[in-house]
Amino acid sequence: MSKIVILILGALLFAPAASANQTEAAADTLKLDQIVITASKIPLSERETTKPVIIITRAEIERNSGRDLSQILNQQSGIRVNDAYGAPSNSRILYLQGAAAQNTLILVDGLPISDPSGVGGLFDLRLLPTNNLERIEVIKGSQSTLYGTDAIAGVVNLITRTGGDAPFQAAGRLSYGTYNTFNSTLGVNGTAGNRIRYTLNYNRESSDGFSAARNPGGLDPFGNDGYELHSFFGRTDILISDNFSISPFLNFSLNEGDYDAGSFADADNFYTLELVNPGIQARYSGNSFRFNAGYNYSRTSRSFDSQFGFDEFEGRFHNADIFSNYSITDNLKLLAGFNFQQFSIPASQDLPERDATITSPYATFYFRDLGGFSAELGYRLNNHTEYGNNSTFSFAPAYMVNDQLKLYGSVSTGFKAPTLDELFGPFGANPDLDPQKSLYYNAGFELYLLDQSLKLTAQYFNREIDDLIVFSAMGYLNRDRQNDYGVELTADWLINSRVTAGAWYNFLDGEITNFFEDGTEAVVSNLIRRPKHSVGMNLGVSVTDRLFIRADGEYNGERQDLFFNPANNFAQEDVTLDAYTLINLYAEYAMMNRSFTLFGDIKNLLNTDFTEVYGFNTTGFAVKAGVRFSI
């Protein structure tokens, strides 16, 4: 183990190389002309954006063929997906810059998806496979001015693939691995005439898995907790004219599997998760004017069959977003939009239907390259059917000192509306709740060296959330304050056309201030399961034109967790999770003019015994091998 750690440190010191989203060694300079949509809803190159952005390309997604969405995101600086290496039956919890999972908004093609019946409105990442993705864009920091509620920590935008130029193309993947894990995908895409592009993708995954709960030493082994996933995505792009198109789509996922009773507790429980997500988008593009309109509907159903009985939950979410941007001059752009969202939970035997709506006009000015200075200034007004009005703003300036150095910063506010259970649920509901409100600021730089083949970045961030919604003896109420801060350092290096490397270091700390009814207050460190220090690295080598090999690893320091001990009447106990280091290995070999690619993926190469959630297992040494093909 010590030798491996030394090798990692050596790679960090002597090959300060690329983060995971830069492993595609197609050129000797960084691809700074990639167009980014999520950061401002205005098409800008990565160099022009005033906010730091993570772009995970299609090539990088394919070079993670043995990993799911949570494991791909977990490789990125500033992102922690807890239980990414846990049993497939366990939920994946995404912490963006240390914020609670409910404070990161998930988008599909720029449209939010939400589960109003989930805890805190949390959407389950297990319902989103990667086979139909073209790229992933991650924007950190409050994005509520552009995207509304739940975007306090930032947004993750999953951008889907569009049809190809040929009348018919097909692509797929077959793989098999440890725990009797099987994956198969098949997609077809193409054109029908000059006006229609289409794409259809089907994905099936299954695994026997391993026991989600750790066995505390009993004689009887715990049973495995496996799963099966079926998903379908279809999209058609219809070009009405050279400037105007409409794109209807349908996203469907069904995930079924086993789960245990809790920490150190085996059980023969069964869950079902289902997502139905249809929608349509329309786009018009002129010389200086662009118009976008989108509507999507999400219905998320969850059921749990356990020793406590059978429980069902359903959430419905309607979202409509219309916005346009206008280039007033070459240096000044204006974006204006209107967003409507409705959250609902159908009636049950115990409760009537619960619903709430948010309507929001918003606008952003973008100033581009005024003597090297650029900035975004935005404002959003929100009207909620229960609590009334609140507003957010954002200001994100950047300054290009020269071709090598960009300074940037931002100050922005965000909000998270109270959930339907908090407003109208069966336990402690409070219809007078206000939204949780955040203030976020950051400052950093991007430095490009060695003819722009090496990119170094650093940023400091601070996020304060007031009016936290907590559950007390009086039910739900707005009370506490959360404050998180951290430093992120990254290095991306395209060493040459065959070798890339990367490294990042994250420091994170945070605390909650509890305000009690008697006027006293207490400050407590509370970033549960989030390490104060973490390091990531990767090294990718195109050994030949056909053979590619990548090693990646991560180190996570000690973390705190909570254990509700059944032997002590479920009293809360603080526990410490040990630090750990993971090493993963991936290789692929292309054949037949790259129509077929053999790949192999090894997770936890050193078979490290580590814990992400106290009382639950994580994967040991695991292998997956398969083939990707395209015709």
Image: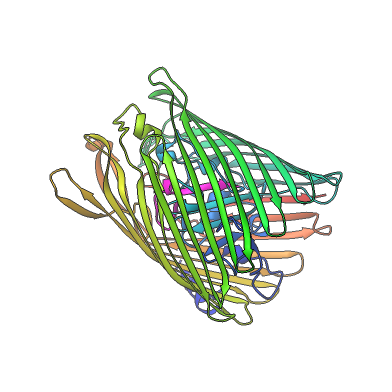
> Looking at the rendering, which quadrant does residue 382 occupy?
top left
Residue 309 coordinates in the image, percent (x, y) = 40, 22
From the viewer's perspective, tell me whether residue 88 is left or right of residue 485. Answer: right
What colour scheme governs how the chains and residues are painted in the rendered image of this protein?
rainbow
Taking the image as shown, residue 543 lies to the left or right of residue 608, namely: right
Residue extending furthest toward the left: 518
Where's residue 59, x and y in %?
Answer: 68, 59
**Horizontal arrangement in the rendering, residue 439 relative to residue 597 (left or right):** left
Asked whether 370 or 19 is in front, the reply is 370
Q: Quadrant of residue 287?
A: bottom right
Q: Position of residue 418 (x, y in %)?
A: 37, 39
Question: Going by the picture, which residue comes out furthest to the top?
Answer: 349
Q: Against 345, is 481 above or below?
A: below
Left or right: residue 316 versus residue 525 is: right
Question: Is any atom of residue 383 visible in this view?
Answer: yes
Of 354 and 599, the residue lying toward us:
354
Query: Up-down: is 288 above or below 468?
Result: below
Provide the residue span drawn in magenta: 94-108
Q: Residue at x 42, y 41 (%)?
A: 383
| In the foreground, 76 or 459 | 459
Give the residue furthest to the front: 328
Residue under the point 52% across and 54% down: 363
Residue 98 is covered by the magenta coloring = yes
Question: Can residue 150 be seen from the camera position used here?
Answer: no
Q: Position of residue 12 (x, y in %)?
A: 51, 74
Identify the residue at image location x=73%, y=48%: 162
